[in-house]
Amino acid sequence: MGRDPLRTRLCDLLGVELPIVAFTHCRDVAVAAINAGAFAVLGEALRSADDIAADVRWVRDRVPGKPFGIDLVLPSSSPPEGSAEELLAEIPSGHREFADRIKAKYDVPEPRGPVALRQWGGLNQQLGRAQIDVLLDERVPVIATGLGCPDFLIDAAHERGLRVFGLIGLAQQAERQLERGVDAVVAQGYDAAGHTGAMGTFSLVAQVASRAGATPVVAAGGATTGRHLAAALCLGAAGIWAGTAWLASAESDVDEVVKARILAASGDDTTRTDCISGKTMRVLTSPWTEEWQRPDAPAVLRSPYQMLLSSDYLQAANDHRRGDLMTEAAGQGVGFVIDRRPTATIVRSMAAEARAVLGELSS
């Protein structure tokens, strides 16, 4: 029997069957992906330290002995301290007035409950450090970081036998991460969901893979099918980081209103904008993103101030299930998401298609 083309350095590093990293904010999706042979990274950027600890234990109980990761978003520009209320008070009045005009124009109600974005670890360095400390204390097998990685984190993780994945959007960022000793580089291209840069996945992955040596490179950006997985391996990656693929899955806790939009969407229904967090990210279009593209819109604030400015709108849209207002981080591969299949079925389908494509090439 020949060597399995899907057995890569990433599989060996993580001790998993398939070189598929399922990035998700849903615990059930993470568990289902892990138990189907993939690896999962749970996005916990908007969770408090206590909530993160509870989620880590919840996942660990359901995947006994199997590795998993946690992802945080820690912008290097975060202020040292300051509550959400204190930071909100620093936002210029012109920006607050523009946000209020958007809410009035689209009849955006007030949020019903606490605004989740206001416990984001990127609001200040104290919150971010508390999140990191939980991951270190809980000895989470893999810690992934986006928008920045504190200098102490890699050494602290390695001292505990943990691994660190660095998400990057430019080749020079990858070089910096490699010099610092990350265990894998996630090369995230322009077509990716969430925070992403301006370089295309096809170009970025090949460039980073040529410089990474023995460190696995994981391709992110548009990866939603087995053909994408096969293509990533041909580019020199050791696997894919997929997020959009799971948004409408059977286990996903994404609101059904948003799931319907995802199932109907194509790549053209997404936009890359900095008006939500102050950093460029790809999301489904919404009135908020469209209004900030107007010529009379003020300059977008840096992170975390823009995140705070957008938080009431985003929370209200979700609380009231206003499909005309809601958005979701979604990549340009969203057009391949066409049904509500179980996560395990998606994992197996990706693997089977990738093996078939690679088999055709080798024959």
Image (tube, rainbow, N blue to C red):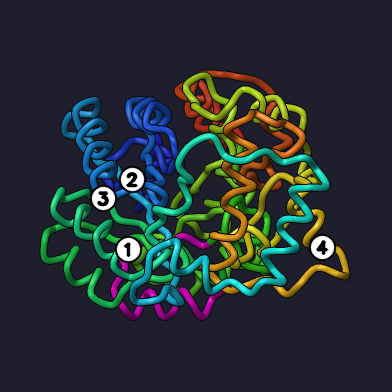
Mark 2 touches mark 1? (CB < 8 Å): no
The numbered dot on residue 49 is 3
Q: Residue 300 shows which numbered tag?
A: none
Work out whether mark 3 precedes mark 4 in sequence or the reverse, and give the earlier one: 3
Where is residue 251 drawn, in percent x and y? 47, 22
| Circle 2 residue | 11
Q: How many marks?
A: 4
Between label 2 and label 1, give the one nearer the viewer: 1
Local secondary structure at mark 1: helix
Please state which of residues 292 and 92 is positioned toward the viewer in this rendering.
Answer: 92
Q: Pointer 4: what residue?
A: 293
Q: Which residue is mark 1?
A: 128
Residue segment shown in magenta? 170-187
Q: CA distance from mark 2 to mark 4?
A: 42 Å
* Sequence-earlier tag: 1 or 3: 3
Magenta span contains residue 176: yes
For residue 53, above or below residue 178: above
Report helix, strand or loop for mark 3: helix
Mark 1 residue type: Gly
Closest to the observer: 236 or 337? 337
Q: Which residue is pictured at 62% across the width and 40% down the height?
A: 110
Can you give x and y, in whole percent of width and height, for residue 152 in the image?
A: 23, 75
The percent coordinates of residue 71 (x first, y second) are 37, 52
Cα–Cα gap, marks 1 and 4? 30 Å
**In the image, what residue occupies the spot 46% across and 77% down?**
77
